Image (cartoon, coloured by chain):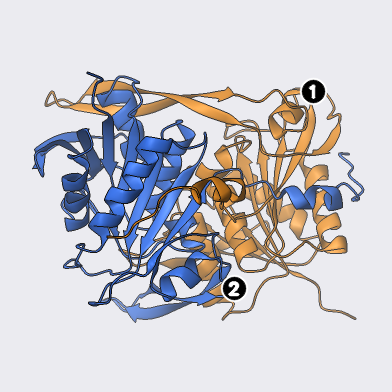
Chain colours: A orange, B blue
Amino acid sequence: MPERPLILVTNDDGIFAPGIRALTEEMLAFGRVLVVAPDKPQSAMGHAITIHSFLRLHQVDQVAGAEAWSCSGTPVDCVKLAIYKLLDGRKPDLLVSGINHGANISINVLYSGTMSAAVEGAMEGIPSIGFSLMDHSIEADFSQVRPVVRNVVANALQHGMAQGICLNVNVPKGSGVPLKGMRVCRQAKANWEDEFETRHDPGGKEYYWLRGEFRGQDHGEDTDLWAVENGYVSIVPTQYDMTAHHAIAELNTWRHEVG
Amino acid sequence: MPERPLILVTNDDGIFAPGIRALTEEMLAFGRVLVVAPDKPQSAMGHAITIHSFLRLHQVDQVAGAEAWSCSGTPVDCVKLAIYKLLDGRKPDLLVSGINHGANISINVLYSGTMSAAVEGAMEGIPSIGFSLMDHSIEADFSQVRPVVRNVVANALQHGMAQGICLNVNVPKGSGVPLKGMRVCRQAKANWEDEFETRHDPGGKEYYWLRGEFRGQDHGEDTDLWAVENGYVSIVPTQYDMTAHHAIAELNTWRHEVG
């Protein structure tokens, strides 16, 4: 009998978030599960890694019955520590990240710790999937996400994934309405209109809280933004070649001089 | 007489790094300069932003004669605070990041705080350029980088840059040998072979330091890796659509079910 697949589970909301518990529960039906996740919330940590400090791992009570470790670092640190410390360099057969409490559509893939962990998995050659529910609440209801997780994971294990690709899966908040289906999408164009809320500490000194407003800038119906706004689950195949290939010819017209 | 361009300078090595001083000195010939940089080293912070804590700005002594602020957050936080707090939403005409003490070629664009600041600039619609010298030393010699900076910035101000594009410029360590020229490149395929060095604290508990080895996986002569290994400055036009467009058709063959 073939060995059951080894599945690495991580997230950015921290190891005690309900979302990672739900994801781990679902993964136990597919294989052996190792959970390595941050010991505190690490949302919006992007692809940060810890190089100016050391890292700790701490074995915690099982998550949903699976072996689980908390890590003092970022989501990407968790992936590296899982592979190169806990698994001695063995690559898991699948990496899943989430279920994130909150959306990771459009350009948020760059800020997202959930998705950066999945991208790191792709860099390691591991089929990797990030799952996010568009509900920031700690009490978010994951019941509509679970069958989506089961379907996408079953597909990924059956079909495999192209080298260097991971998936960014976003599920709209249910609110009692059934999901309309799933759509394979591209990342929508958008921007953040930021502002900083200024406050004063007891000593009178200013400090600032970031408050941004997400602005979709894309009218395409093939985007993750359109999908989730219209009741569909979005799946964006995601890669990490950031080269603007279409800009190379134009840049070659510049007069380049080195001295 | 037209107003001189407003140039925002940032980095990830921190506001007191020699590299940002050299960059600021060069920028003063091109326009008015505002420096906003981290108050401590923020290398490898990727596209992280600070959302679980507040941010501080602190006006410091001028850097090379330019108005300068240190920021308690990440390089991307610096860009957001510069635009939305210090400039009241006005976009600078150019953003430059660096000069980084160390290379940012290939997949390191994802880990790099220097380049993430430039990518954030591109997201804001600002022509943005990250400069890196392949020498981690605090005493790195930037004399060969300076004419490169002047040339690329002059080109960028003259030609402008396509919406959503920034540049990733890497300069090989000189070691007395003249640079051969500049090459417009794509991001090389590569991976990190990581390991963790295990140590024990005085109480006997384990902790880990990340030690990675960069492995080029690309034999193309059109990559940034090839360029810098062969004595050329590399320029990679960089964008932030992470969609794996080529994978969409394949994913549409999957049997997607939401319940």
Viewer-proximal residue, A85 or B182? B182
Of all chains, the one bearing label 1 is A
Residue A66 versus residue B149 in the image, above or below = below
Rendered residue at 37%/36% (across/down): B158
Q: Quadrant of the N terminus of chain B?
A: top left
- Residue A205 position, x and y percent, is 15, 26
The residue wearing badge 2 is B218
Q: Quadrant of residue A210?
A: top left
Dot 1: element:
loop
The three-letter amino acid code for the residue at tag 2 is Asp
Does the rendering let one see residue A70? no
- Residue B18 position, x and y percent, is 17, 57
Of all chains, the one bearing label 2 is B
The residue wearing badge 1 is A176
Structural crowding at the residue carrying mark 2, measured as other residues with C-alpha within 10 Å and reported as few (<14), some (14–19) or many (≥20): some
Structural crowding at the residue carrying mark 1, measured as other residues with C-alpha within 10 Å and reported as few (<14), some (14–19) or many (≥20): few
The three-letter amino acid code for the residue at tag 1 is Gly
Asked whether, in this view, residue A230 is left or right of residue A81, the answer is: right
Viewer-proximal residue, A135 or B187? B187
- Residue B209 position, x and y percent, is 37, 73
- Of the two numbered discs 2 and 1 in the rendering, the one whose residue sits closer to the viewer: 2
Asked whether, in this view, residue B105 is left or right of residue A200, the answer is: right
